[in-house]
Image (cartoon, coloured by chain):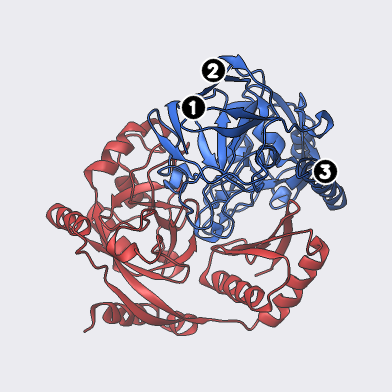
Amino acid sequence: MKTRYSFGGDEHVFVECDEEMSLQAFFKGLSMTNAVRESKIKGVTEICPANASFQIKFDPDVISPDDMLAELKRLEVSASKGVSSIKTRIIEVPVLYNDPWTHETLMRFRERHQDPNSTDIEYAARINNLETVDNFIKAHSGSPWFVSMVGFVAGLPFLYQMVERGRQIEVPKYLRPRTDTPKLTVGHGGCFSCIYSVRGAGGYQMFGVTPMPIYDPAQSISYLKDFMILFRPGDIVKWRPIDRPEYDQIVADVDAGKFVPRIREVNFSLEEFERNIDGYNKKLEETLYGH
Amino acid sequence: MAIKVVSPGLSTTVQDLGRPGYYHIGIPLSGAMDRAALAAANLLVGNDESAAGLEVVFMGPELEFTAPTIVAVTGGEIPPKLNGTPCETWASFAVKSGDVLSFDFLKAGARAYIAIAGGVDVPVVLGSRSTYTLGALGGHEGRKLMAGDVLPVGVASSKARAGRSLEQKLRRKTSNPAELRMLPGLYWHRITEEAGKHFLSDTWKVAPEADRIGYRFRGGKPIDFVPRTPPFGAGSDPSNIVDACYPYGSIQVPSGTEPIVLHRDAVSGGGYFMVGAVIAADMDLIAQLQPHMPARFVAVDMPTALAARKDMNAQAAAVRASLQS
């Protein structure tokens, strides 16, 4: 892992912790962004952590770009031991895989897809050697996922699958991005899953939808009253496959203000996770479901 | 005091100077794309320069005022008319109750700014009144204006008066072809030396897909990449990276074909490499580019970017000094 620094114009420093994705790279970025926050460097206006990199926005009228860069490099040394465990949350996300809305949308954009003769989920199952869509859903929902970035559009989580690299689902993005994606689509591109918080353009393969809103600018949904965005970097997600009747029930419950997402506090330790991935995930699930 | 929207124009939105601080969760800066023009319009009508006004794109709205007030129009040349009679731009003028402000066809530039004494008084969301349409956030109901909308206006300051005008030399002209100064960096190392040369020497044209999220350019040669084994998680296309933050002003080139400069409603991150970023001093210029206009990217170094920034700040100070009397 080699840290690479670059200016993004005269107002940003871009720091790539590693060229490739890993939880180690995420945690290195987390350590450094925490260090930047704590050091209260004058002129820093915003700290944006990402999957394996981060960005610092600064005011060059307050701190010169060279001084900003020197401060960050100084912090890299002190942050190198860094955090590898965090107090966070595990959140259950119900998913209707193979839903009618993403199906309608993916059929409209078939000519932009690698395989116009199958659906996104069939294609993803095949190229990941999972044989059937059911097996794919089992693989996708079988382990927890780590929110390694929030962004693109308001409140959209990027999710990294918490399994050995050899088992991680990987798919290419659409050949050309779609101009439409249903709201709350569960998508996947590269090694990342995501939940589209709003309707709009997108290039990720579409596998299903969740009935659980994750962004509410009106702040009228019961669990989004305090803040309009649900996810934070470091959250852990467990997908739960649901059927259409349950999907409809959750939509009705959300509308009635009765839906309460299943969220539990949890400590995550990268070392312990890496020592025994399946065992650790099982413990996370026990925390979520309380048995 | 309110403004009735008789017809909305193409895409008129409420904007102030922006909503910094939430980019890390995907909520962009938003705010006027031509910040200097909105600031000047506000100062002309006696507002704080960060008050909310209206950003007009290509085609102006028709607005009716429910009470007497002071108004100013700045920015691109979309000539305003009061009750059908042309009125001066970059100058404050009085309107009476029932007066209608409308606009003639676009002559130059792309975006005009309307300031009203007291400012457009929509609710402040996350510290700003700016509209972020993709997120349905801020502004008037989180969207562009529609016929029949009624916009509340705040209380005018004691400094509001008609007949204030910004001297010619302080009004920014648009240049054609546009030269956008950029600092090469970010993932510049991903492209070949030859590709870097023609990226900077080619003349690009603004594509029709040019909006508040980003300005797309086409017409230059496709970019060749330095060969690599794709890093895990990035995706197989040579233009893919492990999804990262996109700086405001950054220039991404999906598949190496059409550069996109992200603007005020930028997507905050994604999986396309970037060749660098347009310097802060030239971001306002982009707001005034029309589709099909030629543009060039000019590589500069950091000292040049900072010198341009100093000039921009000096210009803003001169506008302030000239109008706050």
Q: CA distance from mark 2 to mark 1?
A: 10 Å
Residue linked to disc 2: B83
Name which residue type carries label 3: Ala
Q: Quadrant of residue A54?
A: bottom right
Name which residue type carries label 2: Asn
Secondary structure under tag 2 reads loop
Say which label, 2 or 1, has the lower sequence index: 1
Instruction: Pick out the residue farthest to the left.
Output: A245
Q: Quadrant of the C terminus of chain B?
A: top right
Secondary structure under tag 1 reads strand
Chain for numbered disc 1: B
Residue linked to disc 1: B63
**Badge 2 and badge 1 in a common chain:** yes
**Badge 1 and badge 3 in a common chain:** yes
In the image, what residue occupies the spot 71% across and 46% down? B277
Name which residue type carries label 1: Leu
* Left or right side of A195 for B121: right
Residue B318: numbered disc: 3
* Left or right side of A41 for A165: left
Q: Colour of chain B?
A: blue
Say which label, 3 or 2, has the lower sequence index: 2
Q: Colour of chain A?
A: red
